[in-house]
Structure formats: structure tokens, C-alpha cells
Image (cartoon, helix red, strand yellow):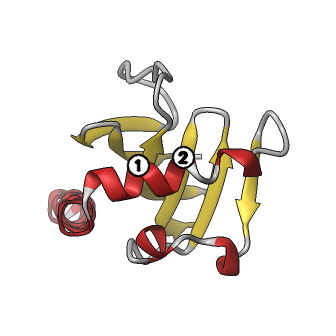
Amino acid sequence: MVLIVAGTLLASCASRKDEGAALVRRIGVSRLAAEAASLKSHRGTPQSEFLQEPAWPPAIRELQPQIVKVDAQGVFVQRWKDYVEEEGIFLKFSGIILDTSPGRDPSFTLIAPDTYWYTTKG
């Protein structure tokens, strides 16, 4: 029983990532990168700045976010949340070196140039 539940959860995580990667391909990496770069000025604190929906650029809006956050490294586009866990697309700012080493929280998986699927366990 536990294996079935764990397998179902793993499959749903993969399908969310696959859906996000498909959206990125459809919208276009260069378009998303340009709109993410336009949000650099919204970085208000060393942590992160939550953007209100009217401030979301059109391509980022097409990613169907629940929340958009801007921090020093890029733009977090949250697409799923359950209590303290969340997943979504991270658009890295040009010139930033992102630590993608295993065991980090959030963890990052490359899905397109400078574009990652992120997972936060909380």
C-alpha cells in the first residue's frame, strides 16, 4: 500500500515538472528570460519580493503561477503548493551561478537554458 502511494506521488511530481517544461517550450525560453530580467528592479530585500498579479509580465502569466517571487538570483514561479512544500519554475538571471548540488532546499533541475524546475520541501 505504501509503495503504491509513494509511486503515485512520484508520478504526480514528474507530471507537474513535465507540464512545466512543456509550457516553457511553448512560451519560449528567450521570451521568459527577457521578462524575468525586466523584474530585476522588483528585488526589494535580500530574501525575496512577492509580486502582485497585475505586475506579472504576460509570458510569466502564461506559466499559470499561483505566486511569483523575485530574489537576487532570479524569479520563482510557483505552480503547486501543499503546506510547506512547493514546486514551480525558476528563471535564473543572466550571469548568476546557481547551486544545483544534491540535498539543497530548494532543489533545482534544469529543464531549459537558465530555466529550472524547483522543489522546496520546507
Question: The residue tagged with tag 2: helix, strand or loop?
Answer: helix
Question: The residue tagged with tag 1: helix, strand or loop?
Answer: helix
Q: Would residue 49 be found to the left or right of residue 74 on screen?
A: right
Residue 83 visible here: no
Relative to residue 3, is residue 79 depicted above or below?
Answer: below
Q: Nearer the viewer, residue 32 or 13?
A: 32
> Which image quarter: residue 115?
top left
Give the residue at mark 1. Answer: 33
Determine the residue positioned at 42% across, 58% down: 88
The quarter of the rendered structure image containing the N terminus is: bottom left
Relative to residue 89, is residue 45 depicted above or below?
Answer: above
Q: Would residue 99 be found to the left or right of residue 50 on screen?
A: left
Cα distance between the residues tagged 1 and 2: 6 Å
Give the residue at mark 2. Answer: 37
Relative to residue 105, is residue 43 depicted above or below?
Answer: below
Q: Would residue 65 be found to the left or right of residue 40 on screen?
A: left
Determine the residue positioned at 67% across, 41% down: 71
Q: Amino acid at mark 2?
A: Ala
Tell me where residue 122 appears, x and y as whole percent.
60, 46
Kindly check if marks 1 and 2 are in contact, taking CB atoms under 8 A apart as contact.
yes
Tell me where residue 56 appears, x and y as whole percent.
59, 71
Tell me where residue 18 appears, x and y as whole percent.
18, 61
Determine the residue positioned at 77% across, 38% down: 47
Q: Residue furthest right?
A: 45
Q: Amino acid at mark 1?
A: Ala
Residue 119 visible here: yes
